Image (cartoon, helix red, strand yellow):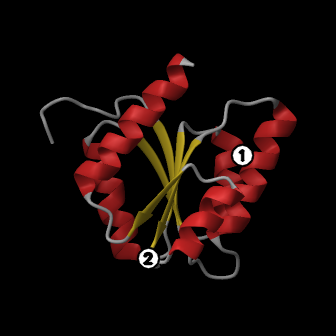
Amino acid sequence: MNGVLRLDQATIVLVEDDPESRESLTLLLESEGAHVVAVADAEEGVETALRVLPDAVVCDLELPCMDGFYLIQRLRDHEIRGNHAPAVAVALTGHTDDAYRLRSIGEGFQHFMTKPARADELVSLLHDEIAARAAG
């Protein structure tokens, strides 16, 4: 993007059921220096996030079987019980209405982005939030 690896060394769990979106987001984040673990469903996303304790989670809300709300509830519970620093959590959805935005924030996501996410906005958001998490 700007010649600097803005997500260098960050570990990000990406949960997206659409293979093309998952691949393009993985390539984007890896091109910025992140280590990305990409999965296709919420259950695998929960298992992965609990195992690797990532710096950030980027999660689609509309997933098969269990949705992104399930994932964030499980992750936040694990972080609280284990006294782990909360991962930066970004909800991705095609829904633009305020109900989804409010529910996602209420359930534990700090950020909400509509699809398709703008690459520069997503990278800047993750960079800034991961840096703030590391500092504080």
Q: Which residue is depicted at the point 49% across and 78% down? A: 97
Quadrant position of the C terminus in the picture: top right
Q: Position of residue 7 (x, y in %)?
A: 35, 34
Q: In terms of sequence position, does the residue under pointer 2 or pointer 1 come before the other?
A: 1
Q: In the image, is 70 to the left or to the right of 28?
A: right
Q: Quadrant of residue 113?
A: bottom left
Extreme-bottom residue of the structure: 64
The residue indicated by pointer 2 is 96
Which mark's residue is nearer the viewer, 2 or 1?
2
Q: In the image, is 121 to the left or to the right of 41?
A: left
Q: Position of residue 84 (x, y in %)?
A: 74, 31
Q: Amino acid at mark 1?
A: Leu
Crowd rating for badge 1 (residues with CA inside 10 Å; few <14, some 14–19, many 20+): some
Q: Position of residue 23 (x, y in %)?
A: 34, 65
Q: Which mark is residue 37?
A: none
Q: Which mark is residue 50?
A: 1
The span from disc 2 to disc 1 (Cα, nearest Å) is 29 Å
* Numbered marks: total: 2
